Image (tube, rainbow, N blue to C red):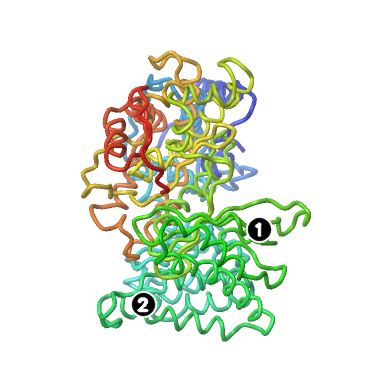
Amino acid sequence: ASLGWFAFEPEWYDTNYTNFAQCEAQSVSLFVQYLSNMKVESIQFGSKGNGQENGNPSADVSEHYHPVWGQMENYAVGREKRRQLLLMLCQHEADRLEVWAQPTNTKENISRPKISADKWIEYTRTSFSVDPRIALSLSSRFPTNTFVKTEVTQLVQANIVDVRNIPEALPYFITPKAVDDNSVLLQQLPHWAPCSITQALEFLSPAYKGHPRVMAYVLRVLESYPPERVTFFMPQLVQSLRHDDGKLVEGYLLRAAQRSDIFSHILIWHLQGETVPEPGKDPSSGKNGSFLELLPAVRQLIIDGFSPKALDIFKREFDFFDKVTSISGVLFPLPKEERRAGIRRELEKIEMDGEDLYLPTAPNKLVTGIRVDSGIPLQSAAKVPIMITFNVVDRDGDKNDVKPQACIFKVGDDCRQDVLALQVIALLRDIFEAVGINLYLFPYGVLPTGPERGIIEVVPNTRSRSQMGETTDGGLFEIFQQDFGPVGSASFEAARQNFIVSSAGYAVASLLLQPKDRHNGNLLFDNVGRLVHIDFGFILETSPGGNMRFESAHFKLSHEMTQLLDPSGVMKSDTWNQFLSLCVKGYLAARRRMEGIITTVALMLDSGLPCFSRGDPIGNLRKRFHPEMSEREAANFMTHVCKDAYNKWTTAGYDLIQYLQQGIEKNFHGFSIEEGIVVNG
């Protein structure tokens, strides 16, 4: 029964009960002591290796029939192996829980004796004999242990029929080599239990060469989910069309499009959003040629498959937002001072056609009208992006509860990289929520709607840090007092808490994504004190200024931020320890879902996005998860990252450069430099 608990992969969970994790760790530690003190019956081995217990022949022992494990060749030997396995697993779990209970305690756990290769193999075989899921969980607990992984692989492949109900066993026999060899093991896939969407999507990568049996399984998994659930991964599905020689992915997309209007619309927008070849070049040339030729054909097949009702909805939805987006082109020739009036004139020409139009970035928000006086032209190096506010209601909510939602319509900018960054942020948000960690992330909606066209949701009730500098000469600490009251008041401390949980959330996201260009125009603060990062034009291996990588800190933690996070100024305050603890827990939770995050990013490798243009972005992303580290080592690593970012001089220096170049207001070690011009990122 105790071993059965380890049939599930190790997870974390946070509660409002302060000492819950510590109590769990202590409970498991007490059980470890009990196991360690159990009396081990003496076991002797005869000349042929047969076990004898207390001098009795093994024939007597073999008559033991265990109520769970059945007939055993040698009950005492088998029981001792299980006890040792359980002891090792419980010790590991106690260490894990101790890290979760005391995430900022940098002391290493009690040193454990080194386990030999033979012992790891014995543990793996013993766990598999009890329950194959325990062996798979063992591999998950020790992801870089080659002895365990090799043995689990052999056991899964040798007992393939017995593990067909365990989706987690898939990577142990669906491999690029198995595909190359057309392994007979792949014949089991029609009978295999469905896996997660991210696991299925991994098999769409070029390494699996579109093997028919693998593809049939992947499509069966995707078909088992409602199309709206799969919509989140639309960028990855569109990219998989590059390697879809058998047109299997295309077939799935067409079928799903017929099942869901929203799925079909999002798919068409993403198909339209792929970059087209430069003018004057043969579209069939280059490695992207056939892919770019395929996209309009798939788009037309989707439209041809619409029912009359679906076609009507499609035309009204797309016509409405095409008209709004085209305003940018109308404004371009106008003088800057006439552009706002020009937006109003164009908006007044657009009529609402039906009550079922929705925001493309948020299909759950139905559009009830346009605020014609809300149009604002934004400054940009590209064309003329415009910001427009819509009246929206929740699709399934009270139709009288009308709320404003502003969106930016961009022309001349490729926003597909922002979509990828926000996908990772959304995955992290879901991970944090599932674990129960109080961390805040806001993955606002972004959708490419055409070549270098896109719609970006404006984060509601926010101001950029540069805009906040227009109203005061002080830093964040002074601004928070101005907005929320004196230090120590309930409203100020609530805002400080909101800043802590959001700063910690974005610290974890920034470590993994490595977003650069973190000037004060790209940092927003909402009306309750929460931090939100926007604009992900430079992530992973790329940075501004010819990749000089001037921002060397893993995330931005300027002096004015530390004034809020750490009133002591020397990393000794309770609020700093809370921030540090949240960062560590967020990082530990993210590591448990490493493969899903990496798969989401890796499937975009051939997209041509700038973030994949140099270095080894996927390899370095994996390294930042540090799968080779124990939980305590990973916790110590994240603690070091936070302390390293604490007022890192290069981040402060980058703010100064941004001010000198663009006039973006910043606070340099508490001294305010007033903003010269307003720049909208």
Q: Which residue is drawn at 49% across and 40% down?
A: 532
> 580 left or right of 517?
right
User: What secondary structure is found at the residue carrying circle 1?
Assistant: strand
Would you say residue 140 is visible in this rendering? yes
Q: Which residue is drawn at 41% across and 23% down?
A: 562
Three-letter amino acid code at disc 2?
A: Phe
Locate residue 95, reporting x and y percent: 46, 27
Given residues 25 and 557, the one toward you in this image is 557
What label sits on residue 108 in the rendered view? Answer: none
Residue marked by disc 1 = 365
First in sequence, mark 2 or 1: give its number.
2
Of labels 2 and 1, the one closer to you? 1
From the top left corner, tell me how far across and down residue 26 is, in percent. Answer: 56, 21
Residue 310 position within the rendered picture, expressed as x and y whole percent measured from the top left: 66, 79
Residue type pointed to by label 1: Lys
Query: Can you say whether 208 is above or below 290 in the image?
Result: above
Q: In this view, does 451 lie to the left or right of 370?
A: left
Q: In which quarter of the image is the N terminus?
A: top right
The residue drawn where x is 31% and y is 30% is 652
Which label number is shown at residue 291? 2
Residue 60 in view, yes or no: no
